[in-house]
Image (cartoon, helix red, strand yellow):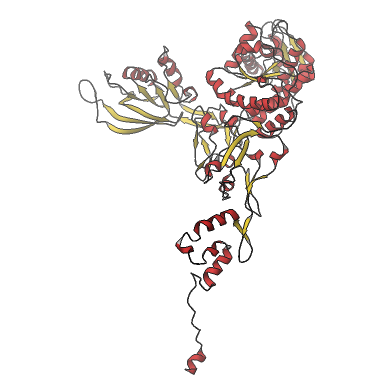
Amino acid sequence: MTASKTLLLCTCDRTQSFDPEALQTAAAAEQVVVVDQLCGKDMKTAAEHLAGSRDVLIACGQQAALFERLGEEIQAEIQHSAPLSSIDIRDRAGWSAPHANPKRLHAKQAALMAAAQLPAPMAPVKTIHSNGVCCIVGPTEQAVRMAELVQDELGVTCIVNDAGPIQLPSAGYDVARGKLTTANGALGNFKLEFSQLQTLNPAGRGEPGYGEAKATARSECDIFIDLRGMGPAFPSHEKRNGYFWADPARTGELERIALTARELVGEFEKTVYFRLEESLCAHSRANQPGCTRCLDVCCTEAIFSAGEHIQIDSDICAGCGSCTAVCPTSAITMNETSFEAITRNLEVMARVYREHTNEAPRLVFHTLAAGAEAIAYLARYDEGLADDLIPLGLEHIDRIGHAEIMAAFGAGYAEVLILADNEIDRRTVTAEVELARAMLAGTHNSPSRVRIIEAIELCAAGDNAGRVSEPVLLVGGRRDITRVTATAMADSIAAPIPLPVGAPYGAIEINSDKCTLCLACVSLCPTGALGDHPDRPEVRFTENACVQCGICQNTCPETAITLTPQLDLSKDALSARPLHGEDPFECIQCGKPFGVASTINRIVEKLENQHWMYTKSDNVQLIKMCDDCRIKAQYHGDNAPMAGGERPRVRTSDDYLDS
């Protein structure tokens, strides 16, 4: 049974307007209350409802922490506080340009409110143990200084990389000298390798010295502090839990690092962001390389090859979702921001907005950190978001691929914008945006309907000339929704849409002059796009199942296969069609079809009177026989090479008695 709910709306000192009834319906609330200063003179209203029996939804994101503290105080006083949730509709929809259409703003507020009522996916977590074993690598002066800052909370070993003097040995940390060669792992499980490692000898009088150098040495630690003054040891180092890199261009780095590193002792919960279905992975088959899209885009190097499939280190994975965005088989899916959750949000927001305006909204994907801050800044100091632009915040925009973009068009959005926080984000999503643009161009829609933008462009009105297509039912996987949307957007289905190289859709072509119909490609195809014919030598192809992994091309011993990236929207792409086939050769003895006629004839041509075994003999006839007839001919013919001598007659008792 769903608990009753009270919706508290605040005009923020009369700087925004609402449609209370529309918001009440979108929030599924039994009661709606409108005030002017919920965080100021009207705070008693919030306190009254938090002390009541209904759930409370406060439409204020800026002061969410204030209302949470208020609820905690009420809980302490009366041993009860109503469940509280909050949502921002002011920065994203309430504050806009003076010339903004109030009807659109109210519709957008209702759309955001309705989407907020959808259940949030729950991601599993794992426990990481850190005993506080810390390795500090860098020059002697900085390493020792850092050790002094953290030695009370952490077990420290300093690996210095210069000949700086050690004035006095310390019992609070160990010191050695060496050069870091490799580093792997994350919080609680770092594995470091060093060359020419020398441990400090604290005994004796005078300046401490180092012992004999070891060519290689390995060390394990929970926390890794990198003070070398060069580039980070890991890509996207800021996403590597337990790793601290001191930027030599910033002041106060040691103190900043020490403040955080000292807290990394104990048990920590690490979100498992992904699900991996190994059986769907098209990475490799029989040692033949295939799809490497996720390996190519992973910014933290959490993905690695494990034979016929990939593996993901959940300790290293930062949950950006770029692997999911490019995976053609959905072998990798996200737990937090699943494709299904995103499409549900897209569908609900577009539908609610259309119901109130009978217009098509536009969509902008942004991050919940820098992107949300940019939107809040524009709302307060500039014109704010355009009145028809609905924002959808994600942890990382790397999560957005062509399927999410096409799903937005399928939901009825007129434009899809992606707000990039930095140049790295822009480069990450560029390939997927270009793929979506190719699909738009192929369906005779303007490719400019999807773009990567800067924050200042959020205020600009779009070319909102109407929906690209009537909304489609967003049911199925990434490839299903992409295909359905593209079909709905196309005026007519003509030739296949050409796509950029590397696209996960396409056809294959077989050079009939080279192909011997060995069917190696069929046996290794990971998606079943390639198949054979049950009654004759033939390669059959289902284009809708092909992910352009390249295993067939790499497997073919005759290099007869070529990949063609394209999107065929016709019904022919859904069923198997012959690519190359030949008539079978019929056995000269029994007439049974076997093998490939052209192959048998080619073998006969190359061997007859060309090889000593097939010269002045009828051995060449064996090649023209099926397996059964060939064995019979080899053992029972007059000139059979495998035939034995005449078997002696079996002697019986009568033979012995007669003799």
Q: How many marks?
A: 0
On the picture, is 208 further left or further right than 505?
left
Tell me if I can see residue 55 in this picture.
no
- Residue furthest out toward the left: 205
- In which quarter of the view is residue 490 placed? top right
- Residue 420 locus on image (x, y percent): 58, 18
Tell me if I can see residue 515 in this picture.
yes
Q: Residue at x 48, y 82 (%)?
A: 648
On the picture, is 633 further left or further right than 353?
left
On the picture, is 185 further left or further right than 431?
left
Relative to residue 305, is residue 539 depicted above or below?
Answer: below
Relative to residue 393, is residue 575 depicted above or below?
Answer: below
Q: Residue at x 75, y 30 (%)?
A: 492
Relative to residue 648, is residue 559 depicted above or below?
Answer: above
Q: Residue at x 59, y 14 (%)?
A: 454
- Residue furthest out toward the bottom: 658
- Residue 395 locus on image (x, y percent): 59, 22
Q: Nearer the viewer, residue 311 or 448?
A: 448
Relative to residue 525, is residue 357 depicted above or below?
Answer: above
- In which quarter of the view is residue 111 placed? top right
Q: Nearer the viewer, residue 624 or 213?
A: 624
Q: Quadrant of the N terminus?
A: top right
Q: Nearer the viewer, residue 516 or 266?
A: 516
- Residue 412 locus on image (x, y percent): 73, 23
- Residue 198 locus on image (x, y percent): 28, 28
